[in-house]
Image (tube, rainbow, N blue to C red):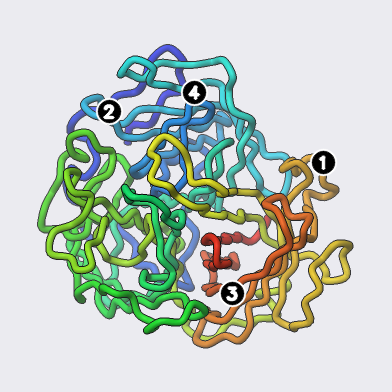
């Protein structure tokens, strides 16, 4: 697999044969490994370059050059040379490096990222810019580089998945997923970065099987956010089953749904392909980029109400998922674990393509503090985990790499294995995003390999919120 080069004098153009969604097949069962969701052995240790697929998250801009970077992303992380890069899609050049730089691992498995070059597009083509570089960002990698979370300065967090091979699932495996929310929409020209908690999918489940390059999604169940009322199901649900094609792309071995149409490039003037794209990592992390509608209309034909994306799993800009546990989780162990992650406020979108949604925020957080820690929200539930952001978003100033205690998550009861549909999030006034607040949410939890993971989606009447936590090293 060709990797991005960390150079300041030119961009990297991948060959046409490797353009996104040029599906070429992903091998046979003989050279792949079947992986039950909860018992997956870790992949072989690989400290070298790793390519990650990342879906678009609302608010992603090009550092100080305020250009909205829509479409899926490629990240490369090289733990051996301590370098990273972020690439987008631009036609006719192909994948283009936008940010590249160096990284250090100060503590707790957290990677600190510093740009050494940022590419801008002042005259129609991307050129290197070494002045006014963004401040450092952060990344959290799962063991053996199976996936993780990343946040570059000025951008929201984004999930990462190492789609190393097409899934081999002779029998159905079940995943639980949450929508990656877009900003609440206000304006006339709607863009594909929105999420309506009353009518759009908040969470759901899907069964996945595969046979060679063919992947089948069955029993797709989608639900709206319970706290907002309504019917409990989205206004428009996908047909089930759906069939996708898996093959080697510049994003990894990703699944394109629907798979009947093979697109060799993202489409004229767009970095976003029409199909939904799904990546599944070696320990079961699943992410989806939900594609885009017709560039001339912004919506997909034959959808009512009109949708701007292929309705496969999540709404918003995509979905993030975990293998569903085979039985109810031990909440004591889940709450007694230390986590690193991000709190993401999706903000409000006014339809302006040259600026992120107003009010959006994305902050590195740690969780697993005792309830008696100074500054913790006052929550009396026995199913609560405490944590918060870092002073000035700088974990190097926090003793032991542990942040403030200004956020609490009360998971509430476990409705089904790994599903907490009546969770509540509490912010104190000291949290970086603003005033004291609380809001209802839905959370899914489970294990990626041997590590506990919690993903959460909520809405506070003004904007959507997401929290993604990975067990800390």
Relative side of 155 to 249, left or right: right
Residue at 31%, 31% in the rendered image: 95
- Label located before the other in sequence (3 or 4): 4
Residue 468 visible in the current orientation? yes
- Residue at image mark 3: 440
Tell me if residue 132 comes above or below residue 382 in the rendering. above
Relative placement, left or right, of 257 versus 384 is: left
Secondary structure at numbered mark 2: loop
Question: Mark 2 or mark 3: which comes first in sequence?
Answer: 2
Answer whether labels 2 and 4 touch (C-beta < 8 Å): no
Residue 257 versus residue 107 in the image, above or below: below
Who is closer to the viewer here, 126 or 40? 126
Task: Report, in whole angstroms, how far the alpha carbon at label 1 lies from the one at label 2.
Answer: 40 Å
The residue that mark 4 highlights is 118
Quarter in which the N terminus is drawn: top left
Give the mark nearest the N terminus, 1 or 2: 2
**Which residue is at the front of the view, 442 or 287?**
442
**What secondary structure is found at the residue carrying circle 3?**
strand
Look at 27% across and 80% down and name the residue there.
219
**Mark 1: few, some, or many residues within 10 Å (few <14, many ≥20)?**
few
Whole-percent x and y of residue 124? 30, 18
Q: How far is the residue under mark 1 from the one under mark 3? A: 32 Å
Instruction: Look at discs 2 and 3 and give the one toward the viewer.
Output: 3
Q: Secondary structure at mark 1?
A: helix
Please give the residue where the numbered disc 1 appears in the rendered image.
397
Q: Earlier in the sequence, mark 2 or mark 4?
A: 2
Q: What's the CA distance linking mark 3 and mark 4?
A: 38 Å
Q: Give the x, y percent position of residue 341.
A: 62, 55
Q: Tell me whether circle 1 and circle 3 mark residues in contact (CB < 8 Å).
A: no
């Amino acid at each position: 697999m060709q990797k991005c080069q960390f150079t300041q004098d030119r961009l990297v153009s991948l060959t046409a044969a490797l353009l996104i969604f040029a599906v070429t097949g992903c091998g046979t069962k003989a050279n792949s490994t079947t992986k039950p969701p909860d018992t997956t052995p870790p992949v072989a240790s690989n400290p070298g370059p790793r390519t990650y697929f990342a879906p678009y998250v609302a608010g992603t801009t090009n550092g100080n050059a305020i250009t909205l970077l829509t479409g899926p992303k490629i990240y490369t992380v090289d733990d051996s040379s301590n370098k990273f890069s972020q690439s987008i899609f631009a036609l006719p050049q192909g994948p283009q490096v936008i940010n590249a730089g160096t990284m250090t691992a100060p503590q707790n498995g957290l990677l600190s990222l510093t740009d050494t070059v940022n590419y801008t597009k002042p005259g129609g083509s991307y050129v290197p810019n070494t002045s006014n570089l963004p401040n450092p960002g952060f990344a959290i990698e799962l063991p053996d580089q199976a996936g993780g979370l990343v946040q570059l300065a000025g951008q929201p967090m984004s999930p990462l998945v190492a789609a190393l091979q097409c899934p081999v699932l002779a029998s159905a495996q079940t995943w639980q997923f949450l929508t990656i929310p877009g900003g609440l929409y206000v304006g006339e020209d709607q863009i594909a970065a929105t999420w309506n908690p009353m009518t759009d999918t908040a969470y759901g489940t899907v069964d996945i099987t595969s046979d060679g390059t063919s992947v089948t999604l069955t029993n797709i169940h989608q639900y709206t956010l319970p706290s907002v009322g309504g019917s409990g199901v989205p206004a428009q649900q996908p047909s089930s089953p759906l069939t996708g094609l898996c093959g080697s792309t510049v994003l990894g071995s990703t699944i394109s749904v629907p798979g009947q149409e093979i697109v060799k490039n993202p489409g004229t003037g767009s970095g976003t392909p029409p199909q939904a794209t799904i990546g599944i990592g070696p320990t079961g992390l699943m992410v989806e980029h939900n594609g885009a509608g017709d560039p001339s209309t912004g919506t997909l034909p034959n959808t009512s109400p009109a949708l701007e994306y292929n309705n496969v799993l999540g709404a918003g800009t995509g979905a993030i998922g975990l293998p569903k546990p085979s039985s109810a989780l031990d909440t004591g162990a889940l709450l007694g674990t230390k986590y690193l992650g991000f709190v993401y406020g999706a903000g409000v979108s006014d339809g302006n393509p040259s600026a992120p949604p107003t009010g959006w925020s994305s902050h590195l957080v740690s969780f697993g503090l005792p309830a008696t820690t100074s500054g913790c929200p006052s929550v009396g539930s026995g199913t609560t985990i405490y944590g918060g952001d870092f002073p000035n978003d700088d974990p190097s100033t926090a003793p032991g790499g542990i942040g403030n205690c200004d956020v609490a998550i009360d998971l509430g009861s476990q409705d089904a294995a790994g599903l907490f549909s009546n969770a509540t999030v509490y912010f104190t006034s000291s949290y970086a995003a603003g005033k004291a607040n609380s809001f209802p949410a839905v959370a899914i939890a489970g294990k990626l390999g041997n590590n506990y993971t919690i993903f959460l989606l909520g809405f506070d009447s003004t904007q959507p919120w997401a929290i993604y936590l990975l067990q800390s090293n």
